[in-house]
Amino acid sequence: MEIISAGLQLGMLYYSSVCCCHIRNKTMRRKI
């Protein structure tokens, strides 16, 4: 159970970081 929860946390962290990167790219393109 602990391993699964840790994996889920890592997945959520990775997913959120990817989303942030996409949002930054969109805002940067809009500014330019």
Image: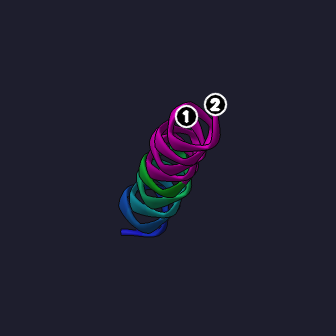
The correct choice, above or below, for 2 with respect to 32 in the image is below
Residue 2 position within the rendered picture, expressed as x and y whole percent measured from the top left: 48, 68
Residue 4 falls in image quadrant: bottom left
The correct choice, above or below, for 8 with respect to 21 in the image is below
User: CA–CA distance between discs 1 and 2?
Assistant: 11 Å
Q: Nearer the viewer, residue 24 or 30?
A: 30
Q: Main secondary structure of the magenta part?
A: helix
Residue 5 position within the rendered picture, expressed as x and y whole percent measured from the top left: 42, 67
The correct choice, above or below, for 28 with respect to 15 in the image is above
Q: Which residue is at a point 42% across and 49% down the rendered structure image?
A: 15
Q: Nearer the viewer, residue 1 or 29?
A: 29
Q: Is residue 9 magenta?
A: no
Residue 23 position within the rendered picture, expressed as x and y whole percent measured from the top left: 49, 50
Q: Which residue is at a point 36% across and 69% down the rendered structure image?
A: 1
Q: Which residue is at a point 49% across and 40% down the rendered structure image?
A: 18
Q: Nearer the viewer, residue 17 or 31?
A: 31
Left or right position of 23 against 8: right
Assess disc 2: are there few (<14), some (14-19) or many (≥20) residues with their C-alpha within 10 Å of its C-alpha.
few
Please, what is the three-letter code of the amino acid marked with disc 1?
Asn
Q: Which residues are magenta?
A: 17-32
The correct choice, above or below, for 18 with respect to 23 in the image is above
The mark closer to the camera, 1 or 2, is: 2
Q: Nearer the viewer, residue 15 or 2?
A: 15
Residue 25 disc label: 1
Assess disc 1: are there few (<14), some (14-19) or many (≥20) residues with their C-alpha within 10 Å of its C-alpha.
few
Residue 32 disc label: 2
Please, what is the three-letter code of the amino acid marked with disc 2?
Ile
Quadrant of the frame with the C terminus: top right
Q: Which residue is at a point 50% across and 63% down the rendered structure image?
A: 9
Which element type, helix, strand or loop, lies under badge 1? helix
